[in-house]
Image (cartoon, rainbow, N blue to C red):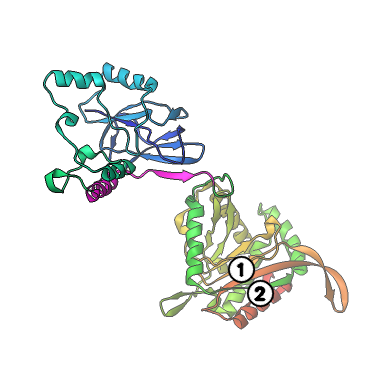
Amino acid sequence: MPYEFKFPDVGEGITEGIIVKWKVKERDNVKIDQIIADIETDKAVVEIPSPKEGIILKLYHKEGETINVGDVLAVIGEENESIGIKQEAKIEGKKEDKKPYTGSVVGFLEEASDEAEKKEIKKGIKTDSATKKILAAPVVRKLAKELNVNLENVAGTCDDGKISEEDVKKFAAKTAEKKPAIKVTKKYDFFGYVERVPLKGIRKITAQKMREAVMNAALVTHHDHIDVTKLSDLRTKEKENAAKKGVKLTYLPFIIKAAIEALKKHPYVASSIENDEVIIKKYYNIGVAIDTPDGLIVPVIKGADQKSLADLSVEVSNFVEKAKTRKIDLMELKGGVFTITNIGVIGSTYFTPIINYPESCILGTGRIEDRASVVNGKIEIRKIMPISFTYDHRVIDGAEAARFMNDLRILLESPDSLFS
């Protein structure tokens, strides 16, 4: 017979809810515990699982509709079953039923009407209540009520079939295992209402990568600043030439070039640890962190040491477009040996970037700004770029990190020979 599944009492004093989304449609096959609907109340979002296996014969409410505890959500049956007109009328009529609510998290127990029971007895058909005498002490009956156990369904193990407290507890535990678990996600905490946003997609992957890095590396961050006044002048000159070729030249290609030269002097910076070995990479694939509405993406410029400033500018621009439109290829995100991330474009200065594990180091650049500096005993306004270098202390120590930063600074403060 078709089973009427009603919006159960989920606790928390909830009496009504709004159907946010049906996870099934009519004629779908469902299994026990399969989520069939998300229902939002004033306190929580509740995932409603199916209490039975079968076919959804009927869904009784639309998405966005408000329903009360006890209203029929769906009718579940078998392949050849259908809902007749009488049963439809019966379900609709129950909305006006003034009988006390007797539902639970697995639905409602259908009770025969007094009229139906009288007819059965009159015909000589005995109901369970008429044939079974319940033998249980008052304390057992009280326990059964507390555990929502119908004593008619409990077999007594004591003398003369008497039901004990242990019988009730075992029955309650057994039926509890069969009840589908209703997941209630509260919309508030101890202090007030909150908004819950699923951690998914890029942000979920990033979260996993960051946790992996923190759990598997001994991270230290070295901060410094670089006078990029000469670099700024060089970029201004090269920028005009690049613009004639349709290339937008930023500071990033210059930083990539300088970083590669510094990596050649300090090979352990471009390495990773595998078991008890340090793997030093002999190639220069540089990752570039790109901010997107969905989170951070790090495409990798392969063979960056073989490319010109213009080539690097074009490749970075292409990566930015691909990342923001989510058209980037998976292989374009792999193979990096060193990553550069820039928060200066957003307006920040120093920070502590986390390595793109299993890489061992990452360089962070901050906002370039005019600052008063002492040059040959005189105060001058210079363009200063703050930098942050995070490294795995298992691979390199503080002294090596400082030497790498010093060489990087020399290259960027005197860029003519490097980019001539």
User: Is 190 in front, or is 307?
Assistant: 190
Residue 171 in the magenta stretch? The answer is yes
Secondary structure under badge 2? helix
Q: CA distance from mark 2 to mark 1?
A: 11 Å
Q: Quadrant of the C terminus?
A: bottom right
Kindly identify which residue carries mark 2: 408
Tag 2: Cα neighbours inside 10 Å, few (<14), some, or many (≥20)?
many
> Of circles 2 and 1, which is in front?
1
* Sequence-first disc among 2 and 1: 1
Q: Is residue 238 visible?
A: yes
Q: Quadrant of the N terminus?
A: top left
Q: Is residue 160 above or below residue 308?
A: above
Instruction: Tell me residue 306's x, y (percent).
Output: 56, 68
Residue drawn at point x = 46 percent, y = 41 percent: 12
Instruction: Tell me residue 83's x, y (percent).
Output: 26, 22
Q: Which residues are magenta?
A: 165-188
Instruction: Tell me residue 333's x, y (percent).
Output: 49, 59
Residue drawn at point x = 75 percent, y = 64 percent: 232
Amino acid at circle 1: Leu
Instruction: Tell me residue 181's x, y (percent).
Output: 35, 45
Quadrant in the rendering for residue 94: top left
Kindly identify which residue carries mark 1: 363
Residue drawn at point x = 81 percent, y = 66 percent: 371
Check the image and name the residue furthest to the front.
138
User: Is 48 in front, or is 96?
Assistant: 96
Left or right: 61, with 302 as reference point: left
Q: Is residue 358 visible?
A: no
Amino acid at circle 2: Leu
Q: Are marks 2 and 1 in contact (CB under 8 Å)?
A: yes
